[in-house]
Each structure stands twice: as structure tokens, then as C-alpha cells.
Amino acid sequence: MNGRKKYWVFALVCSFLVFSAVTFNGTIAESAEYTWSFAQPWTRPLTDAVFTKFCERVKEYSGGRIEVNFFPSGQLGGHDENFHAMQEGSLEIGVFSPYPTLIPGGCVPNMTWIIVNWDEMRLAYRQPDGILYRVMKDAFEDVEGHLLFACSQGAYGLGNNKRPIRTTDDFTNLKLRVSASPGGVKTLANMGKGKGLMLETVPWGELYNALSRGVVDGCWTMWASLVEERHCEVLKYYSDLNFIWDSTYVVMNKELWDSLPDDLKEAVRKASLEAEAELLDTQQKAEKQFIEQLKERKDFTITWLTPEERDALRLASDMGPMWEELCGKWLEERYPGKDMVNVIPAELEKIHKEVLAKEAQK
């Protein structure tokens, strides 16, 4: 190649590189000021799609100054591993369950009957003044995290192979699978008190086989698990008690959050609020689809409780003493002298009644 041809090849290459560095609005593209990793320890396609959009929105709203790389399906390790990485700052953002062994304040969302439907979820976690948003924001700050937004797959009801469950009498002589969740176990024990109810601890991964072999008569489960984990194949009845609410949280390292300038905090906050709203809509729509699929099964019966039936079971659960037993110590340490062990249930009850009143007007 002669000198003239070499010059033109070099000029073309340089032109291409310059053109590639120019964005559509004519500005020179620069590398991101911040590059973060966002870890999802589970495989959940519906939520993963929204999390991917969240990353894209952060980049857009920050003007390209923040680049968030999303790693789904445990690519960066398991839940606890990710949590400790977020705490120390080697992981910027992660999705976490409120395990009290990791997050002492996680005792609050692990209580039963705190939320029974999506409308209550929206009010309880509304930013910045929703009661559960405020409490969980403080809970994560205690463990070096900053809460961005809450996620949920919905409510847990009770499935079994003996009969529909509407009242405490329907717990008679049932053998139900439970986990190590103290609130859930105590709630079932109270609802079935004096009815011969038996509770058995069975690992979640072994639940399908335990139900199919009659090791247990039933379990708490949710619409998504009935379909995606095929619990409907080994259960005959499902009652929508909605007494346990699924909750996970997208959280980032607090030191990193505190170090951000206000405009970038606002960019992340805006993307978070949009992702939270989209997740709620996505999961609620998916739940409706799961319900329609289950309605088509000839061997599966759905029992819809009335508000009065559900409230009677709430009353039988005797939650008052449980709040003190399971959450009292942390709440008093975190909010000394503020009587939060009574304030939180009272605010949740207010939300419950507000939603019931709106439903009654429809």
C-alpha cells in the first residue's frame, strides 16, 4: 500500500472513531462517571424485565453519568452473599428479602395480616410517608443500606386437600406445612387453636413431593407458586386468606448513596419510583392471569373469602401479643419511647379500613 492509500485508510478509521463517539444529539459520548452492579439472586423473569428497565432509566435520567449492569439469576452469588457484598460496598445494588437474621428490622414485614391486597401495598409502601416504607428505610439504614423501592409477588393464602377454609372450624385435624417463619407459624396455631391442627416443617423445595405423598395436607402458598411451581397439581382447594404478604426490596449501599450529588440522587429516585409502580402493575396483572389459569382446572377449587370472613380469621390470629414478642425489642431500640409496637399496627389497620371503605363504594 503506497503512502497516499495509507493516509486515506488512516483518515477513514479516524473519522469512523470520531463518528462512533458522537451521540444522536451531537455531543461527544463520555464514559460513565459511575459504573454499578445490580444483583438479583433469584430467577424471576417478570421482575427481571422491570429491573432491566430500571437500569436503563438510571442511565437516561443521569445523562449517562451512571451505568448500572444487571446480573439476574444468581450470577453474582446467592442472597446472603449479595447482602454482605452490598453492606461492604463491593456490590452497589441488590434485591433482598427481609430476613431478620440479616436485617433485624425485617421482623416487621414478616408479620402476618399487615397487608392483604395490592391497594394496601401501595399505601403502606408509598414514598416517602407510607408506614412500611418509613420503617424499612430505617431498617436498611441500620445495616448500611439505602432502600430504593419495594417489590412483591403478592399474598399467601392456604391450600389443602381436605376442604375449603373459611372459618377457624375448617382447620380441624389438618396437617399443614410451615417454614421457620415465627409469625406465620404462630398465626396458624392461633387460628387452629383447639381444632387438632398439626404443623410440620418441610423445606420449600420438598413441598411438592410432601403434598403428593400426603405427608402434609396443605401449606401456605401464593398464586404464582400454584402455577409456576405446580402446587395446583397436588392441592385440591385454595382459600385466599392473604394473611402473609410477599416482600422483597431493592437496596443500594448507603455510603455510596450518601456520596452522590443531589441531581444524581434525584435521577435514581425517579427511576426507582417508576420501577416500583411498574412492578406492582406487572405482578398484579400476572396474578390475574394465574387466577384465570387456575379457574380452568376441573380438579382445583378456589374459595374467595368475604372481608368479614377474613377479618374474623385476623381476629382469631391474636396478633397483638405477637407484635410485642417478635418486633418489640427492635422497635424500642430503633424508636425509643415512640410506642411503635402499637403505632405500626394502628396505621396498618387504618389503611386496611380505608381500602375496605373504598371497595364498598364501588
Image (spheres, grey):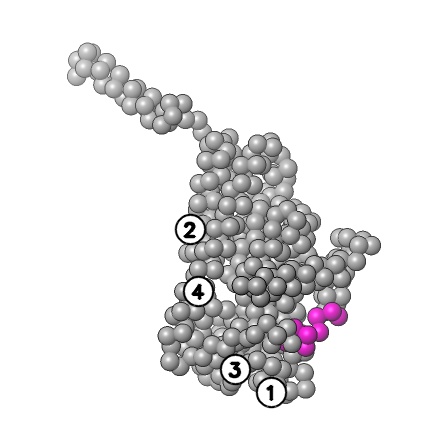
Which numbered mark, 2 or 4, is in the foreground of this view? 4
Q: List the residue tagged with mark 4.
A: 288
Q: List the residue tagged with mark 2.
A: 49
Mark 1–mark 3 Cα distance, whole angstroms, equals 12 Å
Return the disc, 2 or 1, that comes first in the chain's sequence: 2
Q: List the residue tagged with mark 1.
A: 172
Q: Give the residues drawn in magenta, as a range.
A: 313-321
Q: Where is residue 169 drawn, in percent x and y?
A: 61, 85
Q: Which residue is at a point 74% across and 69% down the rendered structure image?
A: 320
Cβ–Cβ under 8 Å for marks 3 and 2: no
Question: Is residue 67 visible from the viewing direction of this image?
Answer: no
Q: Secondary structure at mark 1?
A: loop
Return the disc, 3 or 4, that comes first in the chain's sequence: 3
Instruction: Answer left or right for 323 relative to 102.
Output: right
Q: Which residue is at a point 66% across and 49% down the rendered structure image?
A: 129
Instruction: Answer left or right for 152 relative to 106.
Output: left
Mark 3–mark 2 Cα distance, whole angstroms, equals 36 Å
- Check disc 3: other Cα within 10 Å, few if <14, some if 14-19, many if 20+: some
Q: Which residue is at a point 79% across and 58% down the rendered structure image?
A: 339
Q: Where is residue 232 drawn, in percent x and y?
A: 43, 75
